[in-house]
Image (spheres, helix red, strand yellow):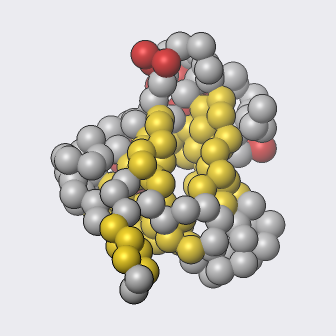
Amino acid sequence: MDHREAQRWRLIDLPKVSDVRGNLTAIEGGSHIPFQIERVYYIYDVPSGSTRAGHAHRELHQLFLALSGSFVVHLDDGQTRQSIALNRPHIGLYVAPRVWRTIDDFSGGGVCMVLASAHYDEADYLRTYEQFSAYVGGAARAGDEATGGPAAE
Ligand code: TYD
């Protein structure tokens, strides 16, 4: 990735408190992550081969965490694409608004927890890649909509 200033996602190494009883990770909105937490949801019992998401958000900030197992998040800001595997509960993936994302390759027992900066609002979604492309200024590649977004590189 050669334009880090513009990078709209990053991994965040969250605190992990370890002792003989196991590990504990706490996340404080506005401190460990760059937004206040207004909503938490989680995706689980995902059938093998399923793809989740396939959309972008206009204003929403999110943090993705693999609470259990693993999955892969494919990201695209219209110029840069990256696929990131998450498999540790203390490493979160922060995603800023205006990023097309799909999530796939869930392991058995994989749980994706998402912290979000706002309540659920369908109006915040960019549900097609064409809509996303127009919203980010036409830089994204139209025509990828049929596949739910471009393939990871
Ligand atoms: P969707 O955003 O399409 O899920 P994914 O990102 O995994 O593809 O949402 C699926 C359904 O769940 C849809 O009917 C809306 C509902 N939903 C809520 O009610 N609240 C939420 O916070 C979310 C994320 C989804």
Residue in the picture at 65% in, 51% down: 85
**Residue most extreme to the bottom:** 21
Residue in the picture at 37% in, 63% down: 16
Q: How many marks?
A: 0
Residue 134 spot, x, y in % from top left: 53, 23
Foreground pick, 52 / 17: 17
Decide: is 53 above or below 69.
above
Name the side, left or right, on which 83 lies relative to 132. Answer: right
Foreground pick, 21 / 14: 21
Decide: is 59 above or below 91.
above
Residue 56 spot, x, y in % from top left: 50, 41
Q: Quadrant of residue 103?
A: bottom right
Q: Is residue 137 visible?
A: yes
Name the side, left or right, on which 3 lies relative to 74. Answer: left
Residue in the picture at 78% in, 32% down: 153
The N terminus lies in which quarter of the figure? top right
Decide: is 64 above or below 4.
below
Decide: is 37 above or below 109.
above
Residue in the picture at 65% in, 34% down: 82
Q: Is residue 125 visible?
A: no
Residue 80 spot, x, y in % from top left: 62, 23
Residue 119 spot, x, y in % from top left: 27, 59
Q: Quadrant of residue 141?
A: top right
Foreground pick, 126 / 101: 101
Q: Quadrant of residue 146?
A: top right
Foreground pick, 150 / 121: 150
Name the side, left or right, on which 31 lies relative to 142. Answer: left
Name the side, left or right, on which 85 lies relative to 25. Answer: right
